[in-house]
Image (cartoon, rainbow, N blue to C red):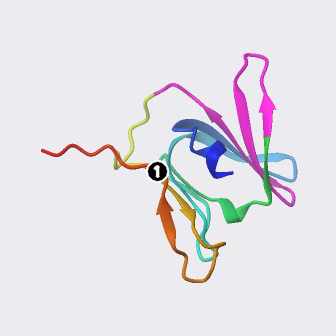
Protein backbone atom coordinates (compact mmCIF):
# COMPACT_ATOMS: atom_id res chain seq x y z
CA UNK A 1 0.00 0.00 0.00
CA UNK A 2 2.74 2.43 0.94
CA UNK A 3 4.58 2.09 -2.39
CA UNK A 4 1.43 2.68 -4.43
CA UNK A 5 0.30 5.65 -2.35
CA UNK A 6 3.66 7.41 -2.42
CA UNK A 7 3.19 7.89 -6.19
CA UNK A 8 0.37 10.35 -5.50
CA UNK A 9 0.76 14.03 -4.71
CA UNK A 10 -2.18 16.15 -5.86
CA UNK A 11 -5.32 14.09 -6.14
CA UNK A 12 -9.05 13.91 -6.55
CA UNK A 13 -10.73 11.84 -3.85
CA UNK A 14 -14.11 10.24 -3.41
CA UNK A 15 -15.33 8.61 -0.19
CA UNK A 16 -17.90 5.90 -0.90
CA UNK A 17 -19.98 4.07 1.73
CA UNK A 18 -22.17 1.13 0.71
CA UNK A 19 -21.90 2.17 -2.95
CA UNK A 20 -22.96 5.79 -2.34
CA UNK A 21 -20.54 8.72 -2.73
CA UNK A 22 -20.58 10.56 0.61
CA UNK A 23 -17.84 13.14 -0.01
CA UNK A 24 -15.57 14.12 -2.89
CA UNK A 25 -13.04 16.82 -3.62
CA UNK A 26 -9.41 17.58 -4.36
CA UNK A 27 -6.43 17.63 -2.07
CA UNK A 28 -2.75 17.07 -1.65
CA UNK A 29 -1.36 13.90 -0.06
CA UNK A 30 0.80 15.02 2.85
CA UNK A 31 1.33 11.87 4.88
CA UNK A 32 1.02 8.10 4.53
CA UNK A 33 1.51 6.24 7.80
CA UNK A 34 0.62 3.17 9.83
CA UNK A 35 -0.86 3.66 13.30
CA UNK A 36 -3.38 1.79 15.43
CA UNK A 37 -4.18 5.04 17.24
CA UNK A 38 -4.90 7.43 14.36
CA UNK A 39 -7.40 7.68 11.54
CA UNK A 40 -7.23 8.59 7.89
CA UNK A 41 -8.07 12.28 7.68
CA UNK A 42 -8.92 14.72 4.91
CA UNK A 43 -9.10 18.34 6.03
CA UNK A 44 -8.46 21.71 4.35
CA UNK A 45 -7.36 20.02 1.10
CA UNK A 46 -4.77 17.98 3.04
CA UNK A 47 -4.91 14.17 2.90
CA UNK A 48 -3.38 12.01 5.67
CA UNK A 49 -3.74 8.28 5.01
CA UNK A 50 -3.39 5.63 7.70
CA UNK A 51 -2.90 2.36 5.81
CA UNK A 52 -4.20 0.44 8.83
CA UNK A 53 -7.61 2.04 8.21
CA UNK A 54 -8.06 -0.24 5.18
CA UNK A 55 -7.96 -3.98 4.41
CA UNK A 56 -6.47 -3.72 0.93
CA UNK A 57 -6.09 -1.53 -2.12
CA UNK A 58 -7.28 -2.07 -5.66
CA UNK A 59 -6.24 -0.50 -8.96
CA UNK A 60 -8.75 0.58 -11.61
CA UNK A 61 -7.54 1.61 -15.07
CA UNK A 62 -9.56 4.46 -16.60
CA UNK A 63 -10.19 4.75 -20.39
CA UNK A 64 -7.77 7.72 -20.50
CA UNK A 65 -4.97 5.49 -19.14
CA UNK A 66 -5.07 7.04 -15.66
CA UNK A 67 -4.87 4.59 -12.74
CA UNK A 68 -7.26 5.06 -9.84
CA UNK A 69 -6.31 3.65 -6.43
CA UNK A 70 -9.13 2.39 -4.24
CA UNK A 71 -8.52 1.77 -0.53
CA UNK A 72 -11.14 -0.70 0.66
CA UNK A 73 -12.59 -1.83 3.99
CA UNK A 74 -15.99 -3.49 4.57
CA UNK A 75 -18.48 -1.46 2.58
CA UNK A 76 -16.40 1.68 2.27
CA UNK A 77 -13.93 2.87 -0.34
CA UNK A 78 -11.58 5.84 -0.52
CA UNK A 79 -10.99 6.36 -4.26
CA UNK A 80 -7.87 8.38 -5.17
CA UNK A 81 -6.95 9.68 -8.62
CA UNK A 82 -3.81 11.67 -9.39
CA UNK A 83 -4.28 15.11 -10.94
CA UNK A 84 -1.79 17.61 -12.34
CA UNK A 85 -3.23 20.72 -10.70
CA UNK A 86 -1.24 22.58 -8.07
CA UNK A 87 -3.24 22.68 -4.85
CA UNK A 88 -2.45 25.26 -2.18
CA UNK A 89 -1.80 23.56 1.14
CA UNK A 90 -0.82 24.99 4.54
CA UNK A 91 2.65 23.40 4.54
CA UNK A 92 4.83 22.25 1.71
CA UNK A 93 6.77 19.36 3.22
CA UNK A 94 5.35 15.94 2.60
CA UNK A 95 6.09 12.80 4.58
CA UNK A 96 5.67 9.16 3.70
CA UNK A 97 6.02 7.07 6.86
CA UNK A 98 6.04 3.34 7.40
CA UNK A 99 6.17 1.21 10.50
CA UNK A 100 9.49 -0.56 10.91
CA UNK A 101 8.46 -3.23 13.37
CA UNK A 102 5.16 -4.76 12.30
CA UNK A 103 2.98 -1.98 13.76
CA UNK A 104 3.87 -2.58 17.38
CA UNK A 105 2.57 -0.38 20.20
CA UNK A 106 5.68 1.79 20.13
CA UNK A 107 4.83 2.90 16.57
CA UNK A 108 8.38 3.36 15.39
CA UNK A 109 8.44 4.99 11.98
CA UNK A 110 11.02 5.28 9.22
CA UNK A 111 11.03 8.16 6.78
CA UNK A 112 10.77 6.86 3.22
CA UNK A 113 10.92 10.21 1.46
CA UNK A 114 12.91 13.18 2.69
CA UNK A 115 11.31 16.63 2.53
CA UNK A 116 12.71 19.18 0.10
CA UNK A 117 13.78 21.96 2.43
CA UNK A 118 16.08 24.79 1.40
CA UNK A 119 19.19 25.40 3.49
CA UNK A 120 18.84 29.21 3.50
Left or right, 116 with respect to 82, comes to: left
Residue visible at 60% across and 32% down?
A: 82
| Number of marks in picture | 1
Residue visible at 45% across and 49% down?
A: 113
The crowd level at tag 1 (other Cα within 10 Å; few <14, some 14-19, many 20+) is few
What is the quadrant of residue 99 in the picture?
bottom right
What is the quadrant of residue 48 in the picture?
bottom right
Callout 1 secondary element: loop
Q: What residue is disc 1 on?
A: 44
Left or right, 100 with respect to 62, comes to: left
Residue visible at 56% across and 28% down?
A: 83
Residue 16 is situated, as x and y percent measured from the top left of the image, at 77, 48
The span shown in magenta is: 59-85
Rendered-image quadrant of the C terminus: top left
Depicted 111 relative to depicted 3: above or below: below
What is the quadrant of residue 68 in the picture?
top right
Residue 37: say if magenta.
no
Q: Nearer the viewer, residue 27 or 38?
A: 38
Amino acid sequence: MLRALETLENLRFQYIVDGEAIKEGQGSLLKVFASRHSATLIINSCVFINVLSFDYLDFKCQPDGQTVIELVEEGRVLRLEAIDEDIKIPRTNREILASVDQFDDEETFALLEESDEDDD
